[in-house]
């Protein structure tokens, strides 16, 4: 076992590429044995996955008719990533295949394609299907691609409590429909019924997520039942979702129960407290503000951050000075920056604004933490008099400190919205955004191009000549500047008065390195050394060969040298892998999305993206189950040790090195 610092990863390449160059024959045989479970020793599977990576629907459809089931299944699963509507009919034919796992793969792929034409085909197949496992997958697929008619079909099914797979399919179908904003009172009532203690635990978990995450449903009639269920429920993942659901039952008794979950004297999972805060945010400000202010000082930074973020959108002018007073006493920079932002935003008197702004600027100049400085720049948005300081710090840091320049531009964009009716100031911001577009910085281009076409901003009246947009578009480096390039195209169309082009992106997925893939054991683990401790992940090469090999290759090439965790959303994710540190950077290529029938659990490791097939180097780890990410972001690994470290990591923490286990 060797530890690989960022400067010593050459050894890793030798270990990863070689299947038998160990120091002894025994080691070589042991390595070879571990590799045998790698399904890509099969060159035909390599070919199928290559066609998937190339998005070659025509080539894949040939394999849908292969005489060998595993090749038919691989081709069917490939269409879950390709998502080509022309595959709907041939996939539907596979719903009658004699192989059960193949029928499951076909159902999954049809759901992923999200073509409404698949709904009647899935319903017909369900009615003749005998396997509960396949039926479960069909119900979930209907939820992904169906219409209100499909929702009625799902809610019309009646299952016994001893039919876990069918109940799971029904619950998943409801949840997937909710993610399409297709809901019904009957469906919500059914989800509540699925919380029954005699229902299998996984089903209750899915039903709870439906209730917790679905937008626009009123759970007030079920308030007492939800509280009782929460008190009886033992599974902490289900409890987390139920706590969120209580925020949709606006009764005093519910609020009292939510407040009880915040008591610091009890051993409560921090994620329960965060969800309780999110649920409480739906209640009247004056009823909950003291609870939030108390949690802002909590020792767990995740809880403190979540509590402080409440005041960014829901603060009150009467409490602006109180936010300022508390902020000055906080030790952790992130909740402090959030409270300062709220204080300046809601302060009414100009003398108060001047005092708060002065404190923020002084703290900015004193700080040596670029992320703190970035958040403090955003805190200055609440006072228009700060625009010159924001402008100077933004452009001074272009090419030097991307985190600061990016957050500064975000602040300027937000500030411009507050003065959109003042023509003189809008002209000033027009010049600032023109300079941002001309800067060549991908993040500045991204934010500036977006605001220029925002309804009500009237930038069409300011720019008599828009050649600078075309010039900037021509200078974009693809795929590194993909997000900015896309925004520029949309903005150019806006100024031309034409609809945005729907043409495909001018990108091709990076080829999969099959030599590297076939050298990786299915249970290969990597220890990630961070400034907060070690995290061990197990790679899933059989599920995501392109993503796994890309991750290893980037490690070998020192791409992650001096990388930091640039994003942390409490009870959601930590994210790493941006060379700029601001979330906009990536390598000089993109890889294809690999969307298999996997679910995001606590500790799932996924690839971040700006849309399908735009993954590169950024990856994230989930704090808790996040089923709304299923089928949208590649899962390529899972945490096997060190989740306590994941929960402790904060923005700016460093990734020091990697160790192959």
Image (cartoon, rainbow, N blue to C red):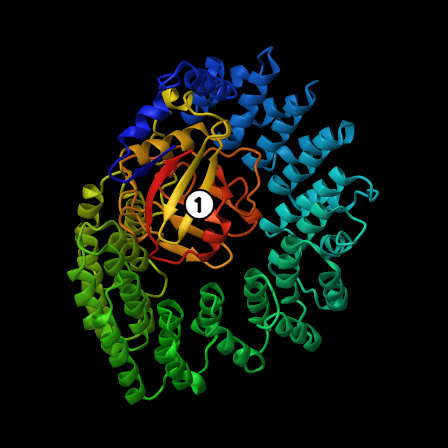
Q: In front: 239, or 245?
A: 239
Secondary structure, mark 1, is strand
Establish if 255 lies above or below 444: below
Total marks shown come to 1
Q: Is residue 183 visible?
A: yes
Find residue 522 and report its horizontal and vertical position in percent.
50, 27
| Most distant residue in the top direction | 67
* Quadrant of the snapshot with the N terminus: top left
In which quadrant of the rendered view does residue 382 lie? bottom left
Find residue 661 and report its horizontal and vertical position in percent.
43, 33
Look at 46% across and 78% down and name the residue there: 315
Q: Is residue 95 visible?
A: no
Establish if 589 lies above or below 176: above
Q: In front: 27, or 127?
A: 27
Establish if 143 lies above or below 400: above
Q: Is residue 182 left or right of residue 493?
A: right
Find residue 157 and report its horizontal and vertical position in percent.
79, 42
Q: In front: 87, or 459?
A: 87
Look at 42% across and 47% down and name the residue there: 534
Q: Residues within 10 Å of mark 1 (few under 14, many from 20)?
A: some
Q: In front: 529, or 334?
A: 529
Query: Which residue is tagged 1?
Result: 535
Establish if 145 lies above or below 50: below
Find residue 301 and report its horizontal and vertical position in percent.
45, 65
Q: Is residue 117 left or right of residue 330?
A: right
């Amino acid at each position: 076992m060797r530890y690989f610092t960022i400067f010593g990863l050459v050894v890793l390449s030798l270990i990863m590429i070689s299947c038998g160059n160990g120091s002894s024959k025994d080691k070589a045989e042991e390595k070879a044995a571990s590799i045998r479970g790698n399904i890509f020793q099969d060159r035909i599977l390599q070919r199928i996955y290559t066609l998937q990576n190339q998005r070659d629907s025509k080539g894949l459809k040939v394999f849908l008719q292969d005489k060998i089931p595993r090749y038919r299944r691989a081709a069917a699963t490939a269409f879950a990533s390709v998502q080509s509507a022309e595959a709907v009919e041939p996939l539907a034919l596979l719903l009658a295949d004699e192989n059960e796992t193949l029928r499951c793969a076909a159902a999954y792929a049809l759901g992923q394609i999200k073509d409404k034409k698949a709904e009647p085909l899935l319903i017909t197949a369900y009615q003749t299907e005998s396997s509960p496992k396949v039926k479960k997958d069909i119900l979930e697929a209907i939820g992904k691609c169906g219409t209100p008619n499909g929702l009625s079909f799902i809610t019309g099914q009646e299952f016994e409590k001893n039919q876990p797979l069918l109940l799971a399919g029904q619950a998943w179908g409801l949840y997937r429909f909710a993610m399409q904003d297709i809901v019904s009172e009957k469906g919500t009532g059914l989800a509540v019924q699925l919380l029954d203690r005699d229902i299998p635990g996984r089903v209750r978990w899915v039903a709870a997520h439906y209730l917790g995450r679905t937008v626009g449903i009123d759970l007030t009639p079920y308030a007492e039942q939800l509280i009782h269920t929460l008190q009886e429920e033992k599974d902490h993942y289900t409890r987390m979702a139920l706590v969120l659901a209580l925020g949709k039952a606006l009764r005093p008794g519910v609020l009292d129960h939510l407040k009880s979950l915040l008591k610091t004297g009890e051993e409560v999972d921090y994620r329960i407290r965060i969800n309780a805060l999110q649920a409480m945010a739906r209640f009247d400000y004056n009823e909950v503000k003291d609870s939030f202010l108390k949690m802002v000082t909590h020792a767990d930074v995740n809880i403190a951050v979540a509590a402080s973020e409440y005041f960014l959108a829901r603060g009150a002018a009467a409490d602006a000075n109180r936010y300022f007073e508390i902020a000055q006493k906080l030790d952790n920079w992130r909740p402090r920056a959030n409270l300062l932002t709220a204080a300046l935003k809601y302060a009414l008197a100009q003398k108060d604004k001047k005092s708060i702004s002065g404190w923020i600027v002084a703290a900015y100049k004193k700080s040596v933490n670029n992320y703190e400085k970035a958040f403090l720049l955003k805190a200055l948005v609440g006072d228009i008099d700060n625009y010159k300081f924001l402008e100077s710090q933004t452009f001074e840091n272009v090419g030097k400190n991307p985190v600061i320049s990016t957050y500064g531009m975000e602040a300027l964009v937000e500030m411009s919205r507050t003065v959109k009716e003042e023509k003189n100031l809008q002209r000033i911001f027009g010049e600032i955004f023109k300079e941002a577009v001309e800067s060549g910085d991908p993040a500045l281009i991204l934010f500036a191009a977006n605001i220029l076409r925002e309804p009500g901003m009237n930038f069409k009246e300011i720019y008599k000549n828009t050649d600078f947009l075309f010039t900037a578009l021509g200078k974009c480096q693809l795929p590194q500047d993909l997000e900015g390039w896309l925004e520029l195209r949309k903005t150019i169309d806006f100024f031309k008065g034409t609809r945005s082009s729907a043409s495909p992106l001018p990108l091709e997925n990076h080829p999969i390195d099959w030599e590297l893939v076939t050298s990786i054991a299915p249970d290969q683990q990597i220890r990630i050394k961070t400034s907060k401790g070690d995290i061990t992940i197990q790679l899933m090469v059989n599920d995501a060969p392109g993503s796994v090999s890309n991750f290893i290759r980037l490690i070998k090439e020192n791409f992650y040298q001096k990388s930091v965790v640039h994003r942390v959303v409490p009870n959601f994710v930590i994210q790493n892998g941006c060379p700029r540190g601001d979330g906009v950077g990536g390598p000089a290529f993109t890889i294809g999305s690999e969307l298999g029938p996997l679910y995001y659990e606590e500790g799932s490791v996924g690839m971040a993206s700006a849309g399908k097939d735009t993954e590169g180097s950024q990856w994230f780890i989930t704090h808790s189950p996040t089923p709304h990410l299923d089928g949208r972001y590649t899962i390529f690994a899972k945490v096997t040790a060190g989740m306590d470290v994941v929960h402790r990591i904060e923005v700016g923490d460093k990734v020091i090195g990697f160790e192959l286990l």
